[in-house]
Amino acid sequence: MSDDLFDKLPTAAGETYDGSAIEVLEGLEPVRRRPGMYIGGTDERALHHLAAEVLDNAMDEAVAGHANRIEVLLDEGNRLTITDNGRGIPVDEHPKFPGKSALEVILSTLHSGGKFSGKAYATSGGLHGVGISVVNALSSHTRVEVARNKELYAQEFSRGATLGKLQKIGAAPNRRGTSVAFIPDTEIFGDQQFKPARLFKLVRSKAYLFAGVEIRWKCAPSLASEDVPAEAVFQFPGGLADHLAEQIGGRECVTTQFFSGSQDFPKEGGAEQGRVEWAIAWPLYSDGAYSYYCNTIPTPDGGTHEQGLRGALTKGMRAFAELVGQGKKVKDLTPDDVVTGSEVMLSVFVRDPQFQSQTKDRLTSPDAIRLVENAVRDHFDHFLTDNLDRGKALLGSILERMDERLRRKAEREVKRKTATNARKLRLPGKLTDCSGEGSGETELFIVEGDSAGGSAKQARDRKTQAILPIRGKILNVASASADKIRGNQEIADLQLALGCGIRKDCNPDNLRYDRIVIMTDADVDGAHIATLLMTFFFQEMPEIVRKGHLYLAQPPLYRLTSGATSAYARDDAHRAELEKTKFKGKKVEVGRFKGLGEMNPGQLRETTMSPETRSLIRITLPPEYEARAAVKDLVDRLMGRNPEHRFQFIQNRAGEIDPELIDA
């Protein structure tokens, strides 16, 4: 078969493919043919991207220091007007296009603008010279007014084509800047209309991003609503910190003070490299919200500036953990552990930024990682160490998130290895459950050993009281690794019996009992076991403690008898008090209980388990999270791996012991 025959083969449409089939699109026709290449589509998001392009140009003037006021007006008929008081688009003749003004070239030619060389703008959101020309191409009508040198000029366009030459309107002694009014083309966007609420939110967010600009919002009264006023003025001296405070509202956070600030990047070769501003909070209960910007352009997919921030926060937390003696706990820490659940606002201004696409959803500038990380790191270190309680509160919260992630990972691995995942969970074999489920009635008594468990089972009210014996001293979770905690059978039985989950998944509403009562012997070993159990609840189920479900029983250590009179004493101090009061001057026979197992069921019921005669101590936590952090610090010092901390505590508190109790 000859080459000539190949050239004459018909196409699918029966036409010959030769040079005449090659189209050359001129002017703005490519934009109208393929709008998705320039604004990501023709949906509602793309429609509002037109507004963002024009507003970004006005913001560039403000960031460059040439404008301090921007006005946004939404009229009926889907007409949007954005005005700034900057320098104004140049109106003189363009040297490469004789007979055309620079304004006409910018509006009707792709890849034209003043932001390529960096001479007119040190940092800017417009990079490719397609923003305003794309808006013009996709609008049925565009009118641009420019006030320069005390003169007012105007030019109109339709679907990218000029409707006439640049006109000199007249004198404008009290006006400067650019005004762009446009109506999106229904041939491209159909009957879609600008959403006032969406535009209002966009305008408000821009004002937060640059404290030196005032943005005035107006819309036709018919477009106003409860959420969107007809007029508003935005100017926020605090920048992102003000924005975050408004977003957090009254929600409780891990730290009462947000981590916020700003920092200029160091100069390179005598040239300004830009700056970074940030504001971060860690709400107690949040799925997280993240707002990233580059040169006031939203970058919802994050990018290299986000990576720099995450690196600074993670390295800062690792360093702080080493400082407070918890360096081993953060060996598995990841940036996700630090950031997940937080409310993050990050804004950078950089020269010649690189984006993943024309819609600028993701920043790809490599230098942004280094610049942001170095700028934020020192500030974060100071934020943590300036107030150790604040730093420890944040570290504790992040470690809980890390442990929760590791637990979920372990559970997924177990599920992959287990063939029978669907089998139902069964209650622990040692649990003697109660039969009733009445609200405010059911109780779980955690007792030490089978002997005490046997007495408690006989002494209990079967309808409302359940018994769970544990063997010996439970694992000290404050000094144990996450893997060791997950592998401990006593802890697994306890979690299964309670049924409410642990750490982040702990839900007090799912608790199977209304009260959890720690009931151990009234001696030193019993106090140690009770302390280990309280440590477990504080670390693994803090919400159970905060909601007031945890109690300490007060079993007696002594039984005092004189004739027909008898009484029970909780400890040595209580015994001494009874001997001086109730048994004063009498010969008293003192019996000491070696443990709950030695008490007969009647005695145990009367002294410790019956609601009518017993005394319980409710375990509580301070309501403020940072105050709870102080409790966590005390638990870590007394129950953690470092024995020197316990020894120091004993030395410091030895003088507080009553000498009479020592003699007794």
Image (cartoon, rainbow, N blue to C red):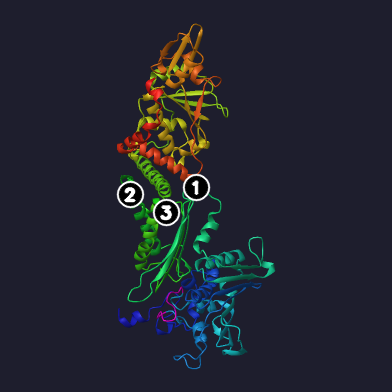
> Which span is picked out in magenta?
116-125
C-alpha gap between disc 3 and disc 2: 21 Å
**124 within the magenta span:** yes
Disc 2, disc 1: CB below 8 Å?
no
- Looking at the image, which residue is at 53% across and 26% down? 442
**13 within the magenta span:** no
Which numbered mark, 3 or 2, is in the foreground of this view? Answer: 2
**Residue 123 placement (x, y as % from top left):** 43, 74
Q: Which residue is mark 2?
A: 323
Q: Which residue is mark 3?
A: 339
- Looking at the image, which residue is at 38% across and 34% down? 653
Q: Would residue 570 be visible to someone looking at this image?
A: yes
Query: Dot 3: few (<14), some (14–19), or many (≥20) neighbours within 10 Å?
Result: many
**Of the numbered discs in the image, which one, if any, rests on residue 285?**
1
Amino acid under label 1? Answer: Tyr
Tell which circle, 2 or 1, labels the residue nearer the N-terminal end: 1
Main structural element of the magenta stretch: helix, strand or loop?
Answer: loop
Amino acid under label 2? Answer: Leu
Quadrant (top left, top right, bottom left, bottom right) of the C terminus: top left
In this view, which residue lies farthest toward the top? 563
**Residue 431 placement (x, y as % from top left):** 44, 24
* Up-down relation of residue 535 to residue 286 (above or below): above
**Along the line of sight, the residue nearer the viewer: 631 or 586:** 586
Give the quadrant of residue 370.
Answer: bottom left
As helix, strand or loop, the secondary structure at mark 1 comes to loop
**Along the line of sight, the residue nearer the viewer: 159 or 561:** 561
As helix, strand or loop, the secondary structure at mark 3 comes to helix
